[in-house]
Image: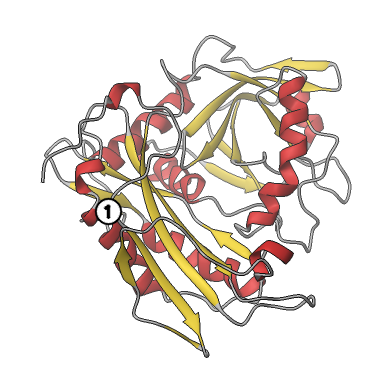
Amino acid sequence: MSKKDIAWSDLGFGYIKTDKRYVSNFKDGKWDDGTLTDDDMIIMSECAGVLQYAQTVFEGLKAYETKDGKIVTFRPDLNADRMIDSAKRLEMPPFPKGRFIDAVKQVVDANRDYVPPYGSGATLYIRPYMFGINPVIGVKPADDYQFRIFATPVGPYFKGGAKPITVKISDFDRAAPKGTGNIKAGLNYAMSLHAIVTAHNEGFAENIYLDSATRTKIEETGGANIIFVDADGNIVIPKSDSILPSITRRSLAIVAEKYLGLKVDQREVTLSEVMSGQFKECGLCGTAAVISPVGRINDHGKEFTFEAGMESMGKVTQKLYDTLTGIQMGTIEAPEGWIYEI
């Protein structure tokens, strides 16, 4: 197969239909064998559970072409585990881990010519998702479900490099202590849309959400975990039961310790210590951008600018970014089990 005729360097972060996607249906208490299909359309009842009560969970990961021409994915086993946890929380039948990984491999392999070439800055984004599909009019879990995976080539999240962003402390709550903040459910992201539109209208790139119980502790943003670098150059990660367990953040913690020799401290982080200058760097981490550097935080008009400033990514954050992307792209040796070759 040959690469598609796509201007890889001009790609944005958006959807492009590819040739194949994977579909499996849960009916009468079991998942069918699943298959690849050309059909990107979904037909369902107007009363489908996902439409009435937002019973849906999803994941996001990427496939890359490495320097030596291999096509790989990064830690899909953790995506499978997280989707199982998400499904259980919403009373959905978990899609088996082994089948999840196999389905990811099938979709990437079937769309190999959409995997952007090494060095282009682009990647193949992979979206597994599951939803209740049979009619549900009373408030209860659906009986039938559909699991799907599609892939789409995407450009770098930041065109021209990652410039530090300004974020605001949100007036809205993202998740309750015993709510669904620690799973990847569609409803969590729907709940954040008004808050992010509000932030954008006010000139900010993102929201930082505080814990809803005391509104004193840093949690995460609408779509990413947060990491800090303290005065000694070590990594501090906010800890909370209502934070999504980001695969990128967990990987960065290992990179910091094992590759860069940094201490990693996962603990509660208060807004007051951030605004009083206890940290010199800050970054938002997730699949799409890996790390988005934060240059400034605005707390209702009071601003704090990190030592790294607004011009470029901080030195420690840059090392984390370069090391993890090097592992993903095959230029740095990966820990065992992190890279799955297609």
Q: Is residue 337 something that shows in the picture? A: no
Measuring from the top left, give residue 114's x and y in whole percent. Answer: 25, 42
- Picture quarter containing residue 295? top right
User: Quadrant of the image for the C terminus?
Assistant: bottom left
Residue pictured at 30% horizontal, 42% vertical: 328
Residue pictured at 28% horizontal, 27% vertical: 8
Measuring from the top left, give residue 232's x and y in whole percent. Answer: 56, 27
Measuring from the top left, give residue 224's x and y in whole percent. Answer: 59, 41
Relative depth, front residue between 222 and 243 = 222
Position of 48 compared to 259: left or right? right
Asked if 125 appears above or below 164 in the picture, the reply is below
Q: Residue furthest bottom?
A: 28
Relative depth, front residue between 307 and 52 = 52
Position of 137 compared to 206: left or right? right
Amino acid at circle 1: Val
Measuring from the top left, give residue 81's x and y in whole percent. Answer: 47, 67
Q: Is residue 77 something that shows in the picture? A: yes
* Count of all numbered marks drawn on residues in the image: 1
Q: Which residue is mark 1?
A: 108
Q: Residue furthest top?
A: 311
- Picture quarter containing residue 272? top right
| Dot 1: element | helix
- Picture quarter containing residue 269? top right
